Amino acid sequence: MAIDTDAIKIHVRGILKALGEDPDREGLRDTPARVAKMYGEIFEGISYTNHEIALMFGKTFEEDMDTIGEGDDMVVVRDIEVFSYCEHHMALMYDMKVAVAYIPNGKVIGLSKIARIADMAARRLQLQERIGFDIAEIMAEVTGSKDIEVVIDGSHSCMTARGIKSSSARTKTVTLRGRFKSEPELRI
């Protein structure tokens, strides 16, 4: 499903009016178009299923397995920076760091693809818990591994800028699959 930027422009103009603003004043005249363009970028992941993201970033390397062994070696990518928007308030989830670990099962994925998967999974109206689930699901499809861990740590403006207004509050979620679930000593 493509993002309907024309509809976004109309609705943003309506929101500006509902806020008591004049959408025709100089500073706001182009705001509906700017917001529509921005939404097309930041919500790009809405246009794709997890399976489609796996196909987009699914390049793997089987021949490299000779150098990393099988069954016991682990690949970990940390500090992948992403952002998302809370589906409850459409509030920014920011300063998010993602760590992804997996135990290869006959093939490895390019490291930049892991970051791209995390970024695309986050570009949706989301819950932080679901981002971890989606990344794990996509990684399992791409790598064929059942052994995956996704750790996400971030701030939510629905807690820091509104409601409780706790500016230091952070949320950490951990998604565990396979051996990471049954063997705690493997966890990152």
Image (spheres, helix red, strand yellow):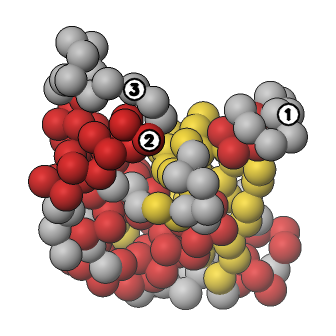
Q: Residues within 10 Å of mark 1 (few under 14, many from 20)?
A: some
Q: Where is residue 154 in the image (x, y as percent from the top left)?
A: 67, 44
Q: Distance between the residues labelled 3 and 2?
A: 7 Å
In this image, 6 relative to 34: left or right?
left
Residue 56, given in percent of the width and then of the height, sits at: 20, 69
Comparing 77 with 38, the one in front is: 38
What quarter of the picture does the C terminus occupy?
Answer: bottom right
User: Comparing marks 2 and 1, which lies closer to the viewer?
Assistant: 2
Secondary structure under the numbered disc 3 in the rendered image: loop
Residue 121 percent location from the top left of the image = 42, 63
- What is the secondary structure assignment of the residue under circle 1? loop
Task: Tell which circle, 3 or 1, labels the residue nearer the N-terminal end.
Answer: 3
- From this view, report whether residue 14 is shown above or below residue 148: above
Q: Which residue in the rendered view is the most extreme toward the top?
A: 26
Amino acid marked by disc 2: Ala
Q: Tell me which label, 2 or 1, sits earlier in the chain.
A: 2
Q: Residues within 10 Å of mark 3 (few under 14, many from 20)?
A: few
Label number found at residue 18:
2
Q: Which residue is drawn at 84% across and 73% down?
A: 184
> Please, what is the three-letter code of the amino acid marked with disc 3?
Glu
Residue toward you, 158 or 11? 11
The label on residue 138 is none
Q: Say few, some or many: other residues with alpha carbon within 10 Å of mark 2 (under 14 / 14 to 19 / 20 or more).
A: few
The dot on residue 21 is 3
Please give the residue where the numbered disc 1 appears in the rendered image: 166
At x 69%, y 45%, the residue is 158
Q: Is residue 144 above or below residue 185?
A: below
- Residue 170 lies in quadrant: top right
- Residue contact between numbered discs 3 and 1, judged by CB atoms under 8 Å: no
* Distance Cα–Cα, label 2 vs label 1: 28 Å
- The image shows residue 148, relative to residue 173, as above or below, that is below
Q: Which residue is located at x 76 percent, y 54 percent?
A: 172
